[in-house]
Image (cartoon, grey):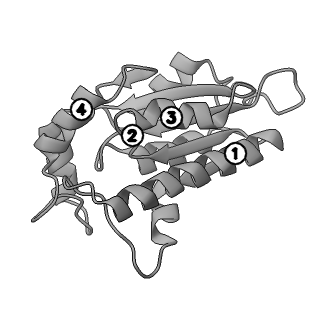
Amino acid sequence: MSAPAPSPGSGSPTPVVVVTGIPGSGKSTVGALLAGRFDRAVLIEGDVLRRMVVSGRAEMSPARKPQALLQYGLRLRHLAFLARSYAAAGFPVIAEDNIIGTYLEEFVAMLGDTLTVHVVVLAPRAEVVGGRDAARAHHAYGEGGWGADALDAAFRDETPGIGHWLDTSEQSAAETVEEIWRLLKLGGDR
């Protein structure tokens, strides 16, 4: 076994890893596994923040209604605030959510320039995402909303090509984490 990832105070900057992609791309699974690679780390899931709106929640859809956009913007702002707060206290942070289009650059800007920020975009093929979604208990795609093909096309067309875009179609979650760990040079294996 190699040495664990550097701890805060060891001279290495505390990383914030932004993991994004469309629903079903593997963000939650990869984020949890990646956070587990550190001696201590924080995983902040956008879905948890979304579910904090208990009544009056407006889900994002192709219509992009004003209330849904307001709630999405608040979610990203709070995700950035929590990431900055934990990173300032020395915790490596994995912040994951569906950060689509120009919102990705805006979100990275919200993190500020004092943090070491890495962007990882999980971009498996749309048919792989659709298959993963069909196998889940809760479905992201269905009537009245996005289809995996349509959201994938919009995501790829509208999202700036910043960070590491990974086609994880043929990878397990563990293989994806290994690739991220290596690409970002996050430290020794645990």
Kind of residue at disc 2: Ala
Q: Which residue is mark 3?
A: 106
State yes or no: discs 3 and 4 in contact (Cβ < 8 Å): no
Q: Identify which amino acid the numbered label 4 is placed on.
A: Ser
Q: In this picture, is 121 found above or below 35?
A: above
Q: Is residue 121 visible?
A: yes
Q: x%, y% of residue 157?
A: 22, 27
Residue 124, how many percent across, how many down? 25, 33
Residue of label 2: 173
User: Closer to the observer: label 2 or label 3?
Assistant: 3
In which quadrant will I find the N terminus?
top right
Task: Give the residue displayed 70% in from the left and 38% down from the top.
Answer: 92
Mark 1 in CB contact with mark 4 (< 8 angstroms): no
Q: Residue at x 43, y 82 (%)?
A: 55
Outermost residue toward the right in this view: 9
Comparing marks 3 and 4, which lies closer to the viewer?
A: 3
Instruction: Give the residue at the far front of this rendering.
Output: 66
Residue nearer the viewer, 9 or 103: 103
**Other-residue count near label 3 (Cα within 10 Å), few / some / many at <14 / 14–19 / ≥20:** some
Q: Amino acid at mark 3?
A: Glu
Q: Find disc 1 in the rendering and name its residue.
A: 41
Q: Which sits in the foreground, 50 or 178?
A: 50
The picture places residue 46, in percent across and down from the top left corner, at: 48, 55
Q: Earlier in the sequence, mark 1 or mark 2?
A: 1
Structural crowding at the residue carrying mark 2, measured as other residues with C-alpha within 10 Å and reported as few (<14), some (14–19) or many (≥20): some
Q: Which residue is mark 4?
A: 169
Question: Marks 1/3: CA distance?
Answer: 24 Å
Alpha carbons under labels 4 and 2: distance apart: 10 Å
Marks 2/3 in contact by CB < 8 Å: the verdict is: no
